[in-house]
Image (cartoon, rainbow, N blue to C red):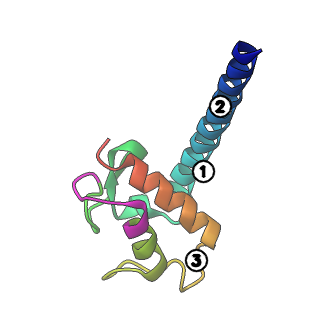
Amino acid sequence: MKILRFLLIILFYFIISIQNTIADEAKMLKGLEIFNETAACAGCHVLKAAGSEGNVGPNLDTVDLTYESVKEMVTYGLGVMPAYGEEGILTDKEIDIVSFYVANSAGK
């Protein structure tokens, strides 16, 4: 009985981890789409994972980025970069997704 219970617990956590992985992969694909198309970040930034070669903004592969720092810059802008959140260019959900994408793609 204890072994069966143990195996069921392991199976439960395995299923949860697979669901999280699938969700993260979908979020990364949507983030790539937002980066390259919706927000057109690729026009200004280098990001190898996105295949972008912009030369206006910083090379995102060479700067230290966290999800939080990316989200703040995307929301409020920085320098010539638009404030995608404050100006209503992207929704909060789109900002979350593209921030997740950039933070998990930069330098890879």
Mark 2 burial class by Cα count in 10 Å: few <14, some 14-19, many 20+: few
Q: Is 32 covered by the magenta stretch?
A: no
- The image quadrant where one finds the N terminus is top right
- Magenta stretch containing residue 64, yes or no? yes
Mark closer to the observer (3, 2):
2
Q: In this view, does 101 lie above or below 7?
A: below
Residue 16 or residue 107, whichever sits in front: 16
Mark 2 and mark 1 lie on one chain; the one further toward the N terminus is 2
Find disc 1 in the rendering and name its residue.
30
79 on left or right of 51: left
User: Residue at 39% of width from left, 47% of height from top?
Assistant: 105
How far is the residue under mark 2 from the one under mark 1?
26 Å
Q: Which residue is drawn at 26% across and 62% down?
A: 55
Residue 57 quadrant: bottom left
Asked if residue 38 can be seen in this view, the reply is: no
The residue at 65%/31% (across/down) is 13
Q: Is residue 1 visible?
A: yes
Q: What residue type is labelled 3?
A: Ile
Secondary structure of the residue carrying numbered label 2: helix
- The span picked out in magenta is 61-69
Counting residues from the start of the chain, the first of labels 3 and 1 encountered is 1
Circle 3 — which element?
Answer: loop
Which of the numbered marks, if any, corresponds to residue 13?
2
Quote the CA–CA distance across marks 3 and 1.
16 Å
- Give the labeled residue for mark 3: 89
